[in-house]
Amino acid sequence: SATNTETQQTSNLIQKLEDVKVEKAAYALKDNRDVSMDCAKIIASPQGYLAVYHTNNNTVFEGRLALSKDLSHWEYITTLDTYASQLTIFSIPNGGYIVGEEKNVFSDGNDNGSELDFKYYKNIDNLFSARADKDLLIPRTQSEWNEGTPNIYSVTFTNPNNPDISQSIIEVGFHYNDLSKEGDREANGAIKNFSSWNSQKDKNINSMFEKMGIKDIGDRDFFSYNRHPYIIYEARKTKNFADWRTYLFDVSNDTLTMLNIQTQGESFAFANPTVSIINGKLIATDFIPKEGSTSGESGEMLYSLPLN
């Protein structure tokens, strides 16, 4: 059972995630080329912050990379991939980066749904010039049609003193489209040695959401706060974009709480949440669909606050 300290910590965290005030939030986030930074995931970089995000360019999703020193001004660096959305990025101890994405696949020119794709860049120069050292497109294992919205939980090396990606295990989360449930559900997978894959449905979290009457469970992000693991999810009860909400899962206590996020203009729908904790700051992003937004707030929202 949860200790009082753990419960108190989780309720403090919920309070922080729900409280978006105008002085610390950016709405309709864009890079310096005036391109929307949809579904951004932010990590620390030697120069400040890196973000991967997608934008819809004439109905083709492009996965992009940008750099910022202050979380407000984002300088476009490169386009990492096309027909790619819902990017995530993870830095590893050998100086390399792993980028995961939801990749549209085609056969004979026809849209054949989406698959998970992971790229490894052995250093920041290769990342900045979009030169992947390894690229693994993963055939679907849980759905006939759609798998995507990857997140990366951890990267473990067989020999930590010699962190070699071809001797590693990468633990990931993703969603799959479940035709029998007429919606998206959650699964976990592992990439071994950047070559083989196995996955299984996340029965625990799927069942917790289903008991709440949820129709779709989509994107998620993992973070650790005071050495305590959390996962933040998006889920909705109908097929309406205005119904997306974010939920915080306290891994240690197996509790799931819907966040009641308060923005300046009182937007009410929030999708594709991410949380990063960098240099004592909690940095959160959510995508606000126009169907659940108020004036000026639709698009990517970014807010950050000190944790002390």
Image (cartoon, grey):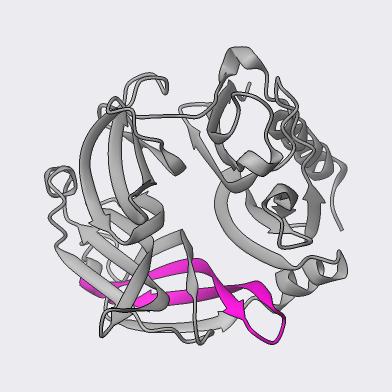
In the rendering, at what x and y percent does residue 176 appear? 56, 75
Residue span colored magenta: 166-193
Please give the name of the residue rendered at 62% of the width and 48% of the height, measured from the top-left corner: 271
Q: Quadrant for the C terminus, please.
A: top right
Quadrant assignment, res 140:
bottom left
**In the rendered image, is residue 95 in sight?**
no
Please give the name of the residue rendered at 62% of the width and 39% of the height, measured from the top-left corner: 290
Please give the name of the residue rendered at 38% of the width and 45% of the height, measured from the top-left corner: 53
In the rendering, at what x and y percent does residue 83 appear? 31, 62
- Residue 75 sits above or below residue 84 on the image: above
Side (left or right) of 54 relative to 258: left
Query: 197 or 76: which is nearer to us?
Result: 76
Please give the name of the residue rendered at 58% of the width and 77% of the height, measured from the top-left corner: 177
Query: 30 or 176: which is nearer to us?
Result: 30
In the image, is residue 186 part of the stretch drawn in magenta?
yes
Q: Quadrant for the N terminus, please.
A: bottom right
Query: 21 or 159: which is nearer to us?
Result: 21
**In the rendered image, is residue 25 in sight?**
yes
In the rendering, at what x and y percent does residue 2 appear? 84, 53
Side (left or right) of 123 relative to 110: left
In the rendering, at what x and y percent does residue 96 appear? 23, 52
Query: 201 or 167: which is nearer to us?
Result: 201
In the image, is residue 93 part of the stretch drawn in magenta?
no
- Residue 123 sits above or below residue 185 on the image: above
